[in-house]
Structure formats: C-alpha cells, structure tokens
Image (tube, rainbow, N blue to C red):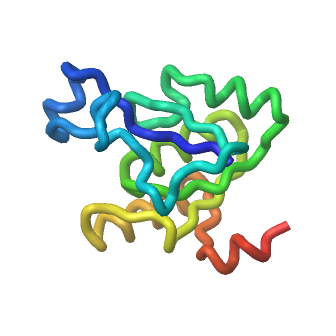
Amino acid sequence: MIYLADNHAENDKEFEIWGRHSIKGTYGAQVIGDLAPEPSDMLIPKTRYSGFYNTKLDIILKRAKVDSLVVTGTLTDICVLYTSADARNRDMSVVIVSDATASLSDDRQKWALEHAKSVLNAQIKTCSEVMTMK
C-alpha cells in the first residue's frame, strides 16, 4: 500500500488558497493513528494536488508494473481527482472508493465522483465492493 500525504514547506504557495496546513514536521502532516501505515507500506510526501507531481510515485508504480490504482482519501474533488487524472494520463485504470473518500460538501463529493466516472472512466466502488475485487 502506498500513502500520499500533504507535506508543505512553511511558505508554500498553496497556503494562499487553502490556508496553512500539513506543514512538514508538524502533527498536521502526519497520517492519523487509525490509518497509520504498516511497516511494509510506503509513505510518499506530496506538495501539490496530484500524488504524481514532483514525487517518485510514477517510478515506483512503473517498477512494480502497476496498471491500476485503487484511490481513497481526501479531498475527493481535489487530491483524489487530480491523482486519478494523472493515473489515467499514464494509461492506468482507476477505482475510487466512494465511502473511503470525502469532500468539504456533499455536492462537491457527488460532482467529483460523477466527473471521475464520466471523464476519467474511473470505476466508483464501495469498500465492500473493493474487498471482493480480484
């Protein structure tokens, strides 16, 4: 499993849009305890909406010959969507887990999932459905 986590410098330009959050080395940049990575998991810090931007995610996935992603997290209409779009741009198939993602409003959540399905051809599945995938 690969975790992507916001990890911003003190003066990150993104703060002009979203305010200060997830500053490198602070509690806010940590994965919450209930979701903490296992020792065999990988944690990749990211500074932008897409987990592919300026990270080693693409190299890691290519080396592992990954051709599909199951995506969870927040915010669905931002980080989940941009990471999913970049995966599709790399010819990967994408599954977004609807009950393991969240947005700041129900309307934004609904829009993001519909957009991912119609534009990215992403599959939208629940946790239960993902657990039965092969």
Q: Which residue lies at the image location 64% right of the left edge and 50% below the top edge? A: 38
The residue most toward the bottom is 128
Name the quadrant of the C terminus: bottom right
- The answer to whether 66 appears left or right of 58 in the picture is right
Q: Position of residue 43 (x, y in %)?
A: 57, 37
Res 92 → quadrant:
top right
Q: Position of residue 25 (x, y in %)?
A: 34, 29
Q: How many labels does the image show?
A: 0
Q: Where is residue 7 in the image (x, y as percent from the top left)?
A: 37, 31
- Asked whether residue 1 is in view, the answer is yes
In this rendered view, identify the residue nearer to me: 29 or 110. Answer: 29
Q: Which residue lies at the image location 61% right of the left edge and 23% below the top edge? A: 56
In this rendered view, identify the residue nearer to me: 77 or 75. Answer: 75
Q: Which residue lies at the image location 70% right of the left edge and 24% below the top edge? A: 59
Q: Which residue lies at the image location 53% right of the left edge and 58% below the top edge? A: 72
Res 33 → quadrant:
bottom left
Query: Height in image: 125 above or below 27?
Result: below
Q: Position of residue 89 (x, y in %)?
A: 62, 36
- The answer to whether 134 appears left or right of 83 in the picture is right
- Asked whether residue 88 is in view, the answer is no
In this rendered view, identify the residue nearer to me: 1 or 39. Answer: 39
- The answer to whether 106 appears left or right of 58 in the picture is left
Res 15 → quadrant:
top left
Query: Height in image: 123 above or below 79?
Result: below
